[in-house]
Image (tube, rainbow, N blue to C red):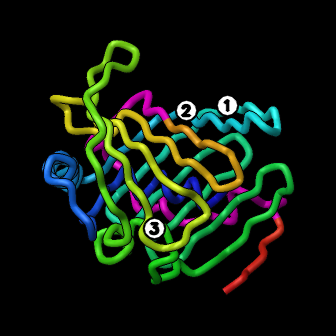
Amino acid sequence: MRKTFLLLISLIIAIGSFAQKDKKATEILDRVIAKTESYKTMEVEFTLAMDNVEADIHDNKNGVLLVMGDKYKLTLSEQIVISDGKTMWTLLMENQEVMINDVEENEESITPTNLLNSYGDNYKSVYLKEDVIKGKTVDLIELTPLKGRTYTKIEVAIEKGLDQIYSFSMFDKNGSTYSYTIKKYTLNKKVGEFEFVFNEANYPNFEIVDMR
């Protein structure tokens, strides 16, 4: 599940450039990138739905993602993921455990740091159609990984006129679909650097597991 959360972070920060380009899809994605990069900070409230028809699994949860450059804080009911761009702290709330990892710099990592540099180059982008979702007019774009991944494709809905991601769905090879819908954007919110560093004093009973 953590990789899907990191994918959310990447897609909200920017879509990146793509190795095999559809002209219309690229034009839309370029506008999203330009607009997103103009923000100093971005806070996103979203809903995540996980469905697997075969296994009869249907789960919904809410989350908040705060982003400033390569730094981010992802808050969910069961876990919090914090990164200052170099180190990542994953807090498992039920287990009262914190796992510490270095932010990996390779094409397999779906992180803000390397998305524009390498990871986005591994997708084929195709414009699908204009659609209306809950009264919002969106452009639907399909991203297909050129290299082996645990998912087969991602469908992204970009809200027309705003050049912002409205939703996206990731289709996993195991039959699961992870669908994210953005409920609210808060842009250029004043945020302190302390938001992106784990403060041990705030979690006195948590076990720290350093995996670096």
Q: What SS does tag 3 mark?
A: loop
The residue to which callout 3 is attached is 111
Is any atom of residue 187 visible in this view? yes
Mark 3, Cα crowd under 10 Å, few <14 / some 14-19 / many 20+, is many
Amino acid type indicated by mark 2: Thr
Residue at horizontal 31 percent and vertical 24 percent from the top: 131
Q: Nearer the viewer, residue 44 or 1?
A: 1
**Quadrant of the rendered image containing residue 49:** top right
Residue 76, numbered circle: none
Residue 60, numbered circle: 1
Mark 2, Cα crowd under 10 Å, few <14 / some 14-19 / many 20+, is some
Q: Earlier in the sequence, mark 2 or mark 3?
A: 2
Residue at horizontal 31 percent and vertical 19 percent from the top: 136
Q: What SS does tag 1 mark?
A: strand
Q: Nearer the viewer, residue 207 or 174?
A: 174
The magenta segment is 181-206
**Position above or below: 48 against 135:** below
Quadrant in the picture for the C terminus: bottom right
The residues tagged by marks 1 and 2 sit, at their Cα atoms, a distance apart of 7 Å
Amino acid type indicated by mark 3: Thr
